[in-house]
Image (spheres, rainbow, N blue to C red):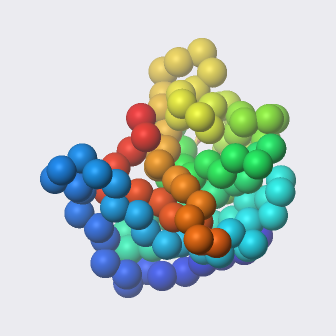
C-alpha cells in the first residue's frame, strides 16, 4: 500500500465561505484501479480507495473503537473494519444497520493529482 506522508503539513482551516480547500495528497497515477493508499497530511490520517473509477477518501479511524480501516476488506463500495467487522458505506460513511458513521472527505482528481478537502466532511 502506497503511503503519502506529510505529517507536518499545515492543517487547512475550514472554509469560512463554504468553498472547498483542496489539499494535494498524492498523484492520480499512484492510486491504481482497485487500489488503496494511506496518506498522512497535517493531523489527518486518510485512507483512499479507487473503486470502479471513483476515488473515495475516509478518515483512517473506525468510529467504533478507532481501528485503522485502510486494510479493511472491500465489497464494492463497502469496507469491513478489520477489528470487529462493522461494515461502512464509502459513499455515505454510515455503518450498515446504522449506529456509527465514519468521516468521509470530499475528494477530486485535478490536473493529475488526487486532492482532498480536509477542512470539511462530505457527510
Ligand atoms: S474498531 Fe472497527 S468495528 Fe470495532
In the depicted view, which residue is nearer to us: 100 or 57? 57
**Residue 60 left/right relative to 49:** left
Instruction: Note whether 76 is above or below 49 in the view shown.
Output: above
The answer to whether residue 70 shows anywhere in this view is yes
Position in image of residue 102 (x %, y %)? 49, 39
The quarter of the rendered structure image containing the C terminus is top left
Q: Report the residue at 68% width, 69% height from top.
A: 28
The residue positioned farthest toward the top in the image shown: 97
The quarter of the rendered structure image containing the N terminus is bottom right
Position in image of residue 87 (x %, y %)? 67, 31
Quadrant of the rendered image holding ligand 1: top right
Residue 3 figure quarter: bottom right
Q: Report the residue at 47% width, 49% height from top.
A: 105
The residue positioned farthest toward the left in the image shown: 16
Q: Report the residue at 34% width, 49% height from top.
A: 120
Instruction: Note whether 96 is above or below 84 in the view shown.
Output: above
Instruction: Note whether 71 is above or below 51 in the view shown.
Output: below
Position in image of residue 90 (x %, y %)? 62, 38
Amino acid at each position: 500500500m502506497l503511503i503519502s506522508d506529510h505529517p507536518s503539513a499545515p492543517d487547512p482551516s475550514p472554509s469560512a465561505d463554504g468553498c472547498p480547500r483542496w489539499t494535494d495528497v498524492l498523484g492520480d497515477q499512484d492510486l491504481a484501479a482497485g487500489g488503496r493508499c494511506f496518506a498522512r497530511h497535517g493531523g489527518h490520517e486518510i485512507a483512499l480507495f479507487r473503486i470502479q473509477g471513483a476515488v473515495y477518501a475516509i478518515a483512517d479511524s473506525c468510529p467504533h473503537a478507532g481501528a485503522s480501516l485502510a486494510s479493511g476488506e472491500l465489497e464494492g463500495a463497502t469496507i469491513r473494519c478489520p477489528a470487529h467487522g462493522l461494515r461502512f458505506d464509502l459513499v455515505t460513511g454510515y455503518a450498515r444497520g446504522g449506529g456509527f458513521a465514519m468521516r468521509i472527505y470530499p475528494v477530486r482528481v485535478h490536473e493529475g493529482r488526487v486532492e482532498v478537502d480536509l477542512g470539511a466532511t462530505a457527510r
